[in-house]
Amino acid sequence: MMLVNWLISVINRRIMKLLVALALIAYIASVWGTYTNMRSIQEHGETKIEQRIDEAVAPLREKIRDLELSFTQRYPPVKFLSEKDRKRILITGGAGFVGSHLTDKLMMDGHEVTVVDNFFTGRKRNVEHWIGHENFELINHDVVEPLYIEVDQIYHLASPASPPNYMYNPIKTLKTNTIGTLNMLGLAKRVGARLLLASTSEVYGDPEVHPQNEDYWGHVNPIGPRACYDEGKRVAETMCYAYMKQEGVEVRVARIFNTFGSRMHMNDGRVVSNFILQALQGEPLTVYGSGSQTRAFQYVSDLVNGLVSLMNSNVSSPVNLGNPEEHTILEFAQLIKSLVGSRSYIQFLPEAQDDPQRRRPDIRKAKMLLGWEPVLFFVVLTVGSAGGRAEQNYPVLQQRAGTSSQ
Ligand SMILES: NC(=O)c1ccc[n+]([C@@H]2O[C@H](COP(=O)([O-])OP(=O)(O)OC[C@H]3O[C@@H](n4cnc5c(N)ncnc54)[C@H](O)[C@@H]3O)[C@@H](O)[C@H]2O)c1
């Protein structure tokens, strides 16, 4: 009996152990099942949520892409230049009329351009189409203060250029042309850059020699109302040659004659913009004196090509850049009046003090040493007479035959 009891207890314990083990396995299996089930539900849910988010965000992403595309600046085409040929070029006064066209040319040629301007007469909008381009930088800076940057070439154009602007603050005009030029020459010396000075035909003053060649020393009233500009530029030239002789700085001096073209400031008081504005507004075209004083106007693209040719030449003495086609101021007034189709009349006012009577560049030096001459001229087209229409003369800007605009 004892043996039977012992056997039963042993069997019971084994069965119990087996039952406990089975229960444990069943429990683990059920926990595992629940866990994997929950995971798959969760994963499924997550995928669904992600899908929904994606669907909701897709149109927003599309909108952002559209906005980015619409804000992406499109620049004028720029040539590729190798590291060896690409120059770092500083243009002072680069936001002005001539400077902005020069900026366009040098940028499109593939150089790195830094424009420095205090926006006295220049405008940001003149160069805004380059803002953000990797080769372009615009610095708001007055050249009367020193500038520390690294460049290979400096086009020094900073200076007011029209009589009302340079007479507005004669002391500042003198400082810009003297201290400003000293600062730029100092920079050129420090970094070993070549400097081109934008000088002017005004260094010849009211000339006694006609046409004016580079050997003529000029006839300037040193205490007249134009002296701050004329003498400022004459001293600037003197400084260039002092730096060349004493410090070995490479200099180029362009004596620029009257220039016209787009981006001239309408209210800056230059004769071409004055006449155009007056003709458009139907106001009298104001001619100072008899109107028999002469000027010769070149188009800005011709000037820009001349400046770049001079900078890259080995000509260190001054060079005239201008159009030798000479007209009286009265002829210009009539030309612009007829171009605009205006009914304005021409009004004669008292002669301006120290106004040069004759102005025409002798450009033989530029032709011979740079192979440069202006290619754009005014010609008069006669249209009409056919079909009973009256003949009419239209002045248009035309390229000289057999030339290219470079
Ligand atoms: N346009 C012409 O017919 C003509 C003729 C002869 C010489 N130039 C010379 O060419 C250069 C450019 O003339 P423009 O017609 O383009 O004149 P502009 O007035 O349109 O440009 C001159 C630029 O220089 C900037 N500037 C003036 N003072 C400055 C200063 N202290 N610091 C920094 N920037 C300053 C102005 O803000 C402007 O952007 C001038 O040096 C001018 O004397 C022009």
Image (cartoon, rainbow, N blue to C red):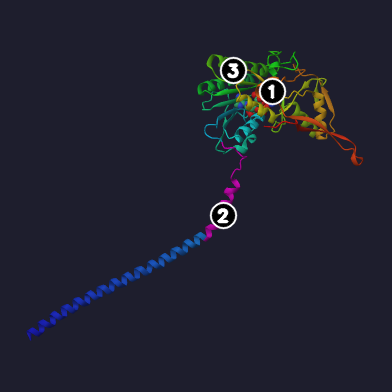
* Magenta stretch, overall SS: helix
Residue shown at the point (92%, 40%) measured from the top left? 388
C-alpha separation, residue under disc 1 versus residue under disc 2: 57 Å
SS for tag 2? helix
Residue shown at the point (56%, 57%) measured from the top left? 59
Q: Is residue 107 a member of the stretch shown in magenta?
A: no
Mark 1 touching mark 3, by CB under 8 A? Answer: no
In the image, what residue type sits under mark 2? Glu
Residue holding disc 2: 62
Asked whether residue 33 appears in the rendered view, the answer is yes
The span picked out in magenta is: 55-80
What residue occupies the far front of the structure in this picture?
402
Which numbered disc flags the more N-terminal residue, 1 or 2?
Answer: 2
Say few, some or many: other residues with alpha carbon within 10 Å of mark 1 (under 14 / 14 to 19 / 20 or more): some
Left or right placement of residue 148 versus residue 231 in this view: left
Residue 45 position within the rendered picture, expressed as x and y whole percent measured from the top left: 44, 65
Which numbered disc flags the more N-terminal residue, 2 or 3?
Answer: 2
In the image, what residue type sits under mark 3? Cys
Residue 27, placed above or below residue 247: below
Residue 144 position within the rendered picture, expressed as x and y whole percent measured from the top left: 58, 22
In the image, what residue type sits under mark 1? Lys
Residue holding disc 3: 240
Residue 146, placed above or below residue 41: above
